[in-house]
Amino acid sequence: MSFRPSFPSVLVLGAVLVLVVAGPGWPSVLAEQEPPSAQQVRRLVRQLGSPRLEQRQQAEQELIRLGPTVLPLLPRAESLPAEVANRLRRIRHQLQLRQAEQMVSGSRVTLQGEMTLAHALQVLQKQSGNRMLDYRERFGQQADNPRLKLDIGRRLFWQAVDQLCDQAGLTVYGYPEQPAVALVVRPPDVLPMKERIVHYHGAFRFEALSCFAVRQLQQRGASHTSVKLQVAWEPKLQPVALELPWESVEARTDGGQALRLDRPGSLVVELVPGAPSEITLPLGEVPRAARRLEHLRGRLQVLLAGTREKFVFDPLMKSVGKSQRRASVVVTLHGVVPNNQTWQVMLLVQFEKTEGALESHRTWILDNPVHLIDPQNRKIPPDGMETFLHEEDKIGISYFFGLDHKPEKYKLEYETPVVILKQNVPWELKNIPLP
């Protein structure tokens, strides 16, 4: 459960996505594999063009083995020979998929030793890549900086956050203005996390919020029991959609009775930007003698947007009809035409595999950053947009710009995730008291 107080001011710890090196006076930090050097990557990229097939294959396999830390060091494929470009696209796609899978599997955090609260939040942020915010001043609370003795060894991100909160007397505020974990003082009537019903799986945290029974007074025997859950994920993730297949949900009472939801299809979970999601599960009629649910379990289907990449069309007018490919996405500048007092810039975005991510009720792709850049290098955002094509694997979007110069003087920048990954996340909550 997240606490939602209601007054404003803010103390923000800046985002630093760097691993901390252990040293004197610094808390122990989880050691990661040393990233490859730029020189090593350049050598392997050159080897992709070797006249010997076995050397080309060896270089491709070695770059994939080095893992996602290679991605920022890889050159663009467009200006390279055809076979080298094709191999680089395969490498990039494999690494981006692995990167997305690693994000779903969750960050591991180590915080050990004596340190201040502010220092602990900085280290937690650096190790996990998730922004940590201290919202106590924002809500008029005392923002002291106590020294803590921590023994958090290689725990999942949410386990570390909850253990830190319990020790510091804090709780998570669920509605920050940006993707982050915001902390406030835990009110006296809010239980610490160690006393709550929680399940951790990779980057996700599941919590039982409430259990309630309803009796319909106008119908015989019309009663049911429901459980409300909260699902939170690491802020650096970008879920496109969450669904809970009804057939995956199963519960058992302390009397041994199995409860299943006899419903077809799935529950589409509402996504609120920057906030955890809530799910209400109607379990039907539960025997009056039952005092608790021994377990309640299910499987969450997650569509995740992976690595984002930038597509630049420069100069604008000479790029009409041209396509650019990154991993499994092709972006085409479909057209640039005058439209009353504006210019209509038409983009076609096509994915090799969408996993249903472009279904009409999912509008995440309309939030992708796009702008023109004028001769003074200023970014011009669109005044509006509309779709002109919507299919299973592609979408056409028209952006409308009011311009001070001829369109020939501009370039277009567009950013989109280039990998869509579908993952199943199992969960199980135990010993839920019944009303």
Image (tube, rainbow, N blue to C red):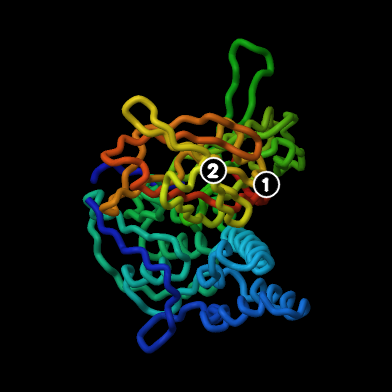
* Up/down of 218 relative to 374, above or below: above
Q: Position of residue 12 (x, y in %)?
A: 29, 59
The residue tagged 1 is: 353
In percent of the image, x 24 and y 64: which residue is there? 144
Q: Would residue 313 appear left or right of 197 to someone viewing this image?
A: left
The answer to which of marks 2 and 1 sits earlier in the sequence is: 2
* Label 1: element kind: loop
Q: What is the quadrant of residue 66 in the picture?
A: bottom right
What amino acid is labelled 1 in the image?
Lys
Badge 1: residue crowd in 10 Å (few <14, some 14–19, many ≥20): some
The reply to whether residue 190 is visible in this rendering is no
The answer to which of 249 and 166 lies nearer the viewer is 249
In percent of the image, x 35 and y 76: which residue is there? 115
**How many numbered markers are drawn?**
2
- Circle number at residue 321: 2
Badge 2: residue crowd in 10 Å (few <14, some 14–19, many ≥20): few
- Circle number at residue 101: none
Q: Position of residue 430 (x, y in %)?
A: 64, 50
In percent of the image, x 45 and y 78: which residue is there? 112
Looking at the image, is mark 2 or mark 1 nearer the viewer?
A: 2
